[in-house]
Amino acid sequence: MTNLGKLSKGLLCASALSLFMGGNAFAAPLNLTPAGTNVQNTFTLDYQVSGVDQPTIDTGTSGTNTPTEFTVDRLIDLTVDSTADSNVAPGATGETLEFSVTNTGNDTQAYDLSLFDPTTDTFEATSLSVLYYVDDGDGIFDPDTGSGGTDGVGVPYVPGTTGPTADIAADGILWVVVTGDIPGTATDGQTDAIVLVADTLEPTTGSTPGAPVVADTGGNTLTGAAENVLGDGSGTAPADAANAGDHSATGTFIIAAADVSASKSVTVFLEDGVDAATCGTIPGTGDTDPLSIPGSCVEYVISATNAGTASATATAISISDFLPEELIFAGAVTSGFGGTPAPTLSTPAVGTDCTITTAPQTTCEVTLTGAELAPGATGTVTIRALVE
């Protein structure tokens, strides 16, 4: 597609319409005059000679001179916008980016959609698919999902294969949704930019799909058929260019992940001389340098931390610990974990002998479910048991 630096036929003198050339879009006035409109203008001139009125010079319909006229040309202009970037988790499926394609020209057009992949990405979403919706005129994206949406059901679109979209009237909007899956190997802060490019096509004629719009050349003709004038701006380089009938915008998948680490330690809390109930509830730090002999009270501490640099809260944390058969369960507590509702700590009864009677071990399981860790938070599960 090529440039043509005229908006309408017959602009032979200063006009209220300002054209911005040199790679910028035309300034789009409100309520654009439809392409092909014939604009006529008349005037009258009265004068006297020696105080005597002379015949009026009139360019009206009853006059002797022809009115001036010109035909408004077809302004090809569009704007592609991304509604928002999308924070996504590693391994997520069916994540979406939403775009709008607005016909800011003065005639009905169709569009060819394509996706452009910048080289600055640090991961790649997979299984990309595209749906488009024709806006119902309210300028709000409200697709029909079975709950009262009015923009209709999305039309599947395969870039490079499907061809023209539905015809979009001047000031109309085409909503485009790009869906993709996020690899589980993606890490916090990585990005994948998706550039949507819309190229203007002629509207559908009967059953014949519209062809790519090209600018008319060879000079301006004042009257007759409307000529094509490409007045679009530039979006995301190098995906499109100004005054080429196309435009683009970028939406980005941004990995917002937790960075969880965990460890487990064991210490001998008391050397001997206590029962399971006392082992599980006695406060303080216990004996100094005790030995792990039968009857000793041992303490396990499971610690989990979500790094302060993480972008997301770790949710649905589940911890499971099966105590070995050499122990008798004495008690367990948890601290530092969040969650709404509060996380659940499940334990065997105090004094349960952890001897394995059948495989796998099921008698001495300590579990924590429904826990959360915000960035920078640490949670612990402390378990005590007697050595048999």
Image: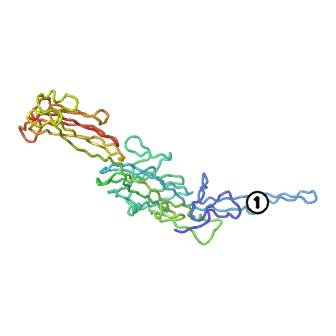
- Please identify the quarter of the rendering in which residue 61 is found: bottom right
As helix, strand or loop, the secondary structure at mark 1 comes to loop
On the rendered structure, is 306 left or right of 34?
Answer: left
Residue 50's spot in the image, x, y percent? Answer: 94, 59
Q: Is residue 174 visible?
A: no
- Amino acid found under the numbered disc labelled 1: Thr
Measured along the vertical axis of the image, is residue 92 above or below residue 75? above
Q: Is residue 148 visible?
A: yes
Residue 251's spot in the image, x, y percent? Answer: 43, 54
In the current view of this chain or complex, which residue is farthest to the front?
Answer: 288
On the rendered structure, is 271 left or right of 198?
Answer: left
Q: Nearer the viewer, residue 21 or 135?
A: 21
In the current view of this chain or complex, which residue is farthest to the left?
Answer: 357
**Residue drawn 69% across and 62% down?**
69
On the rendered structure, is 71 left or right of 129?
Answer: right
Quarter of the image that includes the C terminus? top left
Q: Residues within 10 Å of mark 1 (few under 14, many from 20)?
A: some
Q: Nearer the viewer, residue 124 or 146?
A: 124
Residue 169's spot in the image, x, y percent? Answer: 52, 54
Residue 21's spot in the image, x, y percent? Answer: 60, 64
**Residue drawn 46% across and 50% down?**
83
Measured along the vertical axis of the image, is residue 67 above or below residue 298? below
State the colouring used for the structure image: rainbow
In the current view of this chain or complex, which residue is farthest to the bottom?
Answer: 218
Q: Which residue is mark 1?
A: 59
